[in-house]
Image: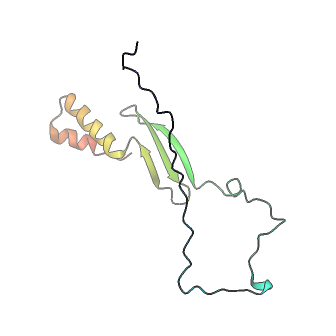
Amino acid sequence: MDTALTSKPPAAVAHAAFVRPDALPVREAVATELAAPKAVTAATDAAPANTASKQPQAYTREITIDPQSREVIFRVIDVRSRQVVRQVPDQALLRMRAYTRALDDGKTPTEALNMADRRA
């Protein structure tokens, strides 16, 4: 007894094979032949370059705790310029949290704005 609730695959499935077309010749291509001293070849005795371990780190990571808000702040700092490249949470988010915290403490919007305008 067949309830027709099951699906059956067809007996024969035709598979379409994709064949990549041959590349068309480049228009006006010119054949070139270089002399042996000018030809570029791969070096046979060269060791693979591992530059990651030889170069100094370009960035340092710093984790601090903000004394006012007691939040953990993660910073990525450029070694040469000592500029903050990335900070989590962002400076704008820290200011917004300080502003809302000051409003919750009963400060006026002007006082809250002054408290939120701090440099990390």
- Relative horizontal placement of residue 103, taking residue 118 as reference (left or right): left
Instruction: Choose between 23 and 89: the one closer to the eye.
Output: 23
Instruction: Choose between 96 and 34: the one closer to the eye.
Output: 34
Quadrant assignment for the C terminus: top left
> Which residue ends up furthest to the right in the rendered image?
45
- Residue drawn at x 72%, y 86% as measured from the top left: 33
- Residue drawn at x 80%, y 60% as measured from the top left: 47
Q: Quadrant of residue 115?
A: top left
Instruction: Choose between 73 and 3: the one closer to the eye.
Output: 3
Q: Looking at the picture, how far across and down is residue 89, in whole percent?
A: 39, 40
> Which residue ends up furthest to the top in the rendered image?
1
Q: Looking at the picture, how far across and down is residue 7, in whole percent?
A: 41, 26
- Residue drawn at x 58%, y 85% as measured from the top left: 29
- Relative horizontal placement of residue 63, taking residue 102 as reference (left or right): right
Q: Looking at the picture, how far across and down is residue 4, in whole percent?
A: 36, 20
- Residue drawn at x 75%, y 81% as measured from the top left: 39
Quadrant assignment for the N terminus: top left
Q: Looking at the picture, how far across and down is residue 67, in whole percent?
A: 40, 34
Relative height, residue 91 to residue 70 (above, below)? below
Relative height, residue 38 to residue 44 (above, below)? below
